[in-house]
Structures are given as structure tokens and as C-alpha cells.
Image: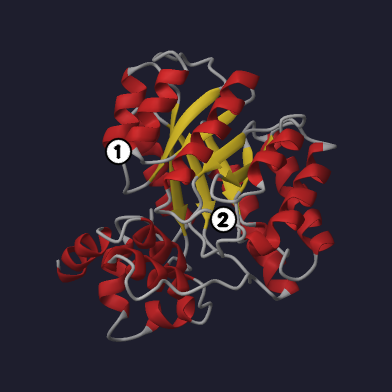
Amino acid sequence: MPETLPAPDDAPLTTRAAEVLRRLALDEDLKWSVPEDPLLGPPAHKVARRYVAGETLADAVERARRTLDAGHRVNVEYLGESCRDARRAAAETEVFLEAARLLPPGCSISLDLSHIGLAVDEDLALAHASRLARATADTGREMVISAEGSERTDAVLAVHRALCAEFDHVGVTVQARLHRTAEDLSALLALPGRIRLVKGAFAEPPSLAYAREDPALARAYLACAARLADAGHRCSFATHDRDLLHRVDRHLGGRGDEGSPWEFETLLGLGPDRLAAMAAKGHPTREYLVFGTEWWLYVCNRLAEDPARVLQALVDAAS
């Protein structure tokens, strides 16, 4: 894990709160202990319901159908990361394979490579990812590799390159926050598969990434988005930032159609109004759904992106 610097005492309260949440999201022990804690578990489950489709694949299938009925595509991820046991990584891969069989058409599958073996061995992750790439190809759905912390970026991109040598439907997620992303895009644009552009939510040092509050992050996101759009490469603009959505839409000419190579994506529980607005302009849209029992770290990252969401979390926990 890259070393991060603590926010100074005179930093805005929201900045310090976000840092605390991101550090909680890095504590792997908490992903097991919080949901099972007799006192913390029940209110934490209530908070998670806003951002997580459910704990089972059946829950995800039901929620995916509702999203499809609303006119949006769906991206489904089975939650989990940093699996350090080879046998468990193999078992988790089977859940993804089942999702490839059971999810309705119009659903792509996303995954953290560390969920299926990257934290054990890169070759193990490639072997499991290759099985899933074959299963998703056979069922006519995209597969998108999720972003992880910067210490894993090289390994993630290496596995993606290896998969692209055999498959043309395997995408990858890049983070505008990372200073390296502009250079990474040059190589990725030469490969098939969707490129999913996010701001990035992980705790990273200033030497490697822009701060979430830094205006330079918006400029970096827009620069990457323009490169993707101008290249005509399959891509997803994944953000809830109203200004960024407006400016990307303007760069695209304010209109899209079902055949456009791009799509706008939002996470479950965040920005449904923004997704509807992009769909009304003819842009392809997608909602990103997650399911599983390892939701605590994911929820912490969602709250860290906008600490004002903590207020909503308090309301949800008390409901």
C-alpha cells in the first residue's frame, strides 16, 4: 500500500473526514468484523442498502432487471478484494462464472483482480480471469476489470494486456486521479475492450495522485475523457459530478444514440437523476450494481467521495 500523508489540522473538516473514511476502507479486518458486530452490524446494513443491490446473486439479478426496465444498461460486480487464499480465490471465481450464466442480457460483469487471485499470484489471477473472459464471451456480455490501489496498477494492466491478446470484449478501469493515467491511456487506446474512466477513490499520496479536492483532478478527468471520445474508443464516463457530466456531454455534441461508443455510468444509490438526464439526450447509460457480503469497504469509499453523505448515512442507520 502506498504511504499516504495525513491531512493537516487546518484542512477543511470534510477533507479530514474523507481521509478517515478512506483509511477505514483500507482496514481489511473491518470488512468482516463490522457487518457481524451485534451493535454496529444492524445500522451498517441499513446504510449499505443505499449502495449495495443485496448480498446474493439473486438480489443482483432482481435489481438488474429493474434497471434494464428503466432503459439503462447494467454493470454488476461481486464485491470482494485482497483475497489472499488461492482456494478461496478459486471459489469466488465460480460466483462470477455463475453470474455470467444467470444475469440477464444487457449486463456486463466487473471484478477486482485481487478478488480472484492477484493478491496471491499474478498468474493465478490471469488463469481465473481467462475463465471468466471465456464465459462472458460465450454469453455475449462485456467484462470490465475494476481499478485498485496504485500499488496494483502495473499488475492489473499486465493481466488486462494478456487477456486482450485473446479477447476483444475485456475492458479496464482507469483513474483520472493518478498522474500516470495519461500515459497509460496511450497504450490502452491501442487495445480492444471498453475503457472505464473514474475519478478514483483510493487513499493515495500526493506524489502519485491528485487530491479529490484539487481542481486539477477535474481538468485531468476532462482531458482523459476528450482523448477517449476523440479516439472513438469504447468507453464509459463514470462520474456523478454534474459539472463534469455537462462538460463531457458538451464535448460529445450534446447528443448520442444507442450505437455511440461511449456511455455514461453511475453507481447504484448515486446520481439516478444524472443518469436519466443523459439518457434523455440519447446517450447510452449504465448503472453499476454491486452485491455480496463484503460491502463495508465499498460503502466507506462511497461515503469518502462526499463526506456530506455521512449525514444521509446517519438518517439511513436510524430508519
Q: Residue furthest bottom?
A: 38
In depth, the one of 96 and 178 nearer the eye is: 178
Mark 1 and mark 2: Cα distance apart in space: 28 Å
Q: Earlier in the sequence, mark 1 or mark 2?
A: 2
Q: Residues within 10 Å of mark 2 (few under 14, many from 20)?
A: many
Q: Specify whether residue 288 is in view.
A: yes
Q: Position of residue 12 (x, y in %)?
A: 29, 65
Does residue 106 lie above or below 254 as drawn? below
What residue is shown at x 67% (from left), y 57% (from top)?
Answer: 113
Above or below: residue 100 compared with residue 151: above
Coloring basis for residues = secondary structure
| Residue 317, percent from left and from top | 21, 69
Residue 134 pos. (x, y %): 75, 41
Q: Which mark is residue 156?
A: none
- Residue depicted at 76% across the width and 57% down the height: 155
Identify the image quadrant of residue 121: bottom right
Whether residue 86 sits left or right of residue 40 in the image: it is: right
Image quadrant assignment for residue 172? top right
- Amino acid carrying label 1: it is Pro
| Count of numbered labels shown in the rendering | 2
Q: Which is nearer the eye, 90 or 296?
A: 296
Which amino acid does the dot numbered 2 rest on? Ala
Residue at 20% x, 63% y: name it: 311
Residue 270 image position (x, y, % from top left): 32, 46
Badge 1: residue crowd in 10 Å (few <14, some 14–19, many ≥20)? some
Q: Is residue 220 above or below residue 304?
A: above
Q: The C terminus lies in which quarter of the figure?
A: bottom left
Secondary element at image label 2: loop
Of badges 1 and 2, the one in the foreground is: 2
Identify residue for label 1: 272
Q: Which residue is mark 2?
A: 209
